[in-house]
Amino acid sequence: MAGSLGDLGGLLKQAQKMQRQMSDLQDELGKQNYPGSAGGGMVQVVVNGKRELKSLTIDPQVVDPQEVEMLEDLVASAFRDALQKADKAASEAMGGITGGMGMPGMM
């Protein structure tokens, strides 16, 4: 019984260490920027690791009042592209800490 309590203490320390590492990693990922583009680069966005839109650039050639719906689609597509890159980077980084344990609630 005493041995199992020692194991539990070690497990708790390991979990706390992992939690600190994940928090530090999330802070670091939040500082990273991830570009996304659509329409051959005509629409470009940058999001950070917190999934916040940091910038949006639209080539004037695609600004046509008759094609607003196409422009909206390009912006949405570029945004999804950037978010996928941010999510992939977060998933890969978290996998290094969790060892692929598939922790719920983690990217």
Image (cartoon, grey):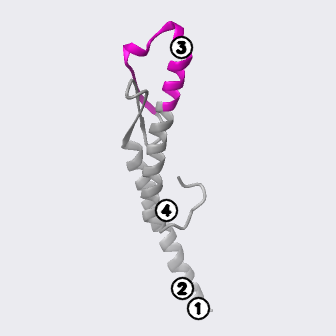
The nearer-to-camera label among 2 and 4 is 4
- Which of the 4 image quarters holds residue 63? top left
In 3D space, how far apart are the residues under numbered discs 2 and 1 (Cα atoms)?
6 Å
In 3D space, how far apart are the residues under numbered discs 4 and 3 (Cα atoms)?
46 Å
| Mark sitting earlier along the chain (1/3) | 1
Q: Which residue is tagged 4? A: 19
Q: Is residue 97 above or below residue 13?
A: above
Residues under numbered marks 3 and 2 in contact, where contact means CB atoms less than 8 Å apart: no
As for residue 60 lying within the magenta part, the answer is: yes
The nearer-to-camera label among 4 and 1 is 4
Q: Position of residue 22 (x, y in %)?
A: 46, 58
Q: Which residues are magenta?
A: 53-77
Q: Is residue 16 above or below residue 25?
A: below
In 3D space, how far apart are the residues under numbered discs 4 and 1 (Cα atoms)?
26 Å
Q: Position of residue 57 (x, y in %)?
A: 38, 22
As for residue 44 lying within the magenta part, the answer is: no
Residues under numbered marks 2 and 1 in contact, where contact means CB atoms less than 8 Å apart: yes
Q: Looking at this view, is 15 or 2 the one in front? A: 15
Q: Amino acid at mark 3?
A: Val
Q: Is residue 6 above or below residue 27?
A: below
Q: Which residue is tagged 1? A: 2
| Mark sitting earlier along the chain (4/1) | 1
